[in-house]
Amino acid sequence: MPATSGRTRLLTKPEAAADLGVSDSTLRRHIAAGEISVVRIGRTVRIDPVELDRFVAEGPRSAAPEPDPRREHILALVARAPRLTADQASRISDVLRASS
């Protein structure tokens, strides 16, 4: 839908959803997940048709997962911990079996 100036006309959310054949709420979920980029003009959200073409061609791009600082801390502690002896591992197994 090129405008006379040679620029591509940005789509509203309902227009973009109709283009994709999905509901407005599905489109909003893809936008919130960062899978579809939007153009914000004040409080208005518009979608570039080129971005929709990319989304259809490539599928949703998943955002890199946020690192979990607790998980990173636990992994660092485990990496520094000394290895268990066979006797220690056996005693832990016995305790765990008795508690279940």
Image (cartoon, grey):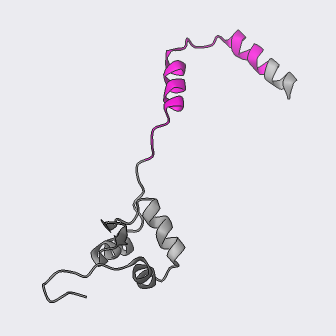
Q: Position of residue 69 (x, y in %)?
A: 49, 31
- Taking 100 as reference, is 54 left or right? left
Residue depicted at x 34% and y 67%: 38
- Taking 76 as reference, is 96 left or right? right
Q: Position of residue 96 (x, y in %)?
A: 79, 23
Q: Position of residue 25 (x, y in %)?
A: 53, 72
Q: Position of residue 71 (x, y in %)?
A: 53, 31
Quadrant for the C terminus in the image: top right
Q: Main secondary structure of the magenta part?
A: helix
Residue depicted at x 30% and y 78%: 49
Q: Answer above or below: position of 51 versus 8.
A: above
Residue depicted at x 25% and y 82%: 9
For this rendering, which residue is in front, 81 or 52?
A: 52
Q: Which residues are magenta?
A: 65-94
Q: Which residue, as the protein is rendered here, is positioned at the far front? A: 42
Q: How many marks?
A: 0
- Taking 47 as reference, is 83 left or right? right
